Amino acid sequence: MEEKTSNYTIKNPLQAGAALGGVKEKDRSWINEFGKQLGIGFQVADDILGVYGDPKVTGKSADSDIYSGKATFLMLAALESADAKDRKILTGFYAGNERSQEKINEIKEIFNKYHVRESAMVTANEYKDRALAIIAKAKISGVAKEELSIFSKFVVERNK
């Protein structure tokens, strides 16, 4: 999974905050792995919202990720699970230029057929749990652990 998103959404801001807050570099070594794990969980959760989120809450169409041909966890999970016929439909859609509502609905049906939303939710929570395990071992205050735990849960369980 790409780490770019985990870097700019989670890891780098946490490192910057810790540095600005006066935390010594030797005392923040855990942040990189925590940020990586939580950042990937964030991205998978974001992929779910990009297809299944409520547009009134997310502020964007639930078709936008599919329409743009974005390579999401959902698409990759569908490709991995799909039979030959559905894999051909998926690869044809993502390789082609036809982005009709009919085709988008067909892609969503394939996603639903292979339960990729559920698979993505499990994966996002696995990454969140890895991040929480890192927090548990970090040499930080109990208050900081609690705040980072709340943040971790929010990042993965959010609806926008």
Image (cartoon, rainbow, N blue to C red):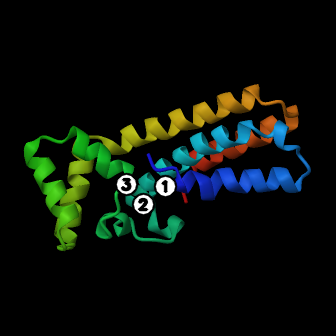
Give the crowd class for mark 2: few <14, some 14-19, many >=20 residues within 10 Å. many
In the figure, is residue 152 to the left or right of 157? right
Q: List the single residue furthest toward the left.
A: 85
Q: Disc 3 marks which residue?
A: 72
Answer whether labels 1 and 2 touch (C-beta < 8 Å). Answer: yes
Q: Residue at x 11, y 52 (%)?
A: 88
Looking at the rendered structure, the number of numbered marks drawn on it comes to 3
Image coordinates for residue 137, horizontal then vertical, percent: 75, 26
- The quadrant of the image that shows the C terminus is bottom right
Q: Amino acid at mark 2?
A: Gly
Mark 2 or 3, nearer chain start: 2
Q: Residue at x 51, y 65 (%)?
A: 58
Answer whether labels 2 and 3 touch (C-beta < 8 Å). Answer: yes
Q: Amino acid at mark 3?
A: Thr
Answer whether labels 1 and 3 touch (C-beta < 8 Å). Answer: no
Q: Amino acid at mark 1?
A: Asp
Q: Which marked residue is nearer to the observer: mark 2 or mark 3?
A: 3
39 or 143, nearer to the observer: 39
Q: Disc 2 marks which residue?
A: 50
How far apart marks 1 and 2 lie (CA) works out to 6 Å
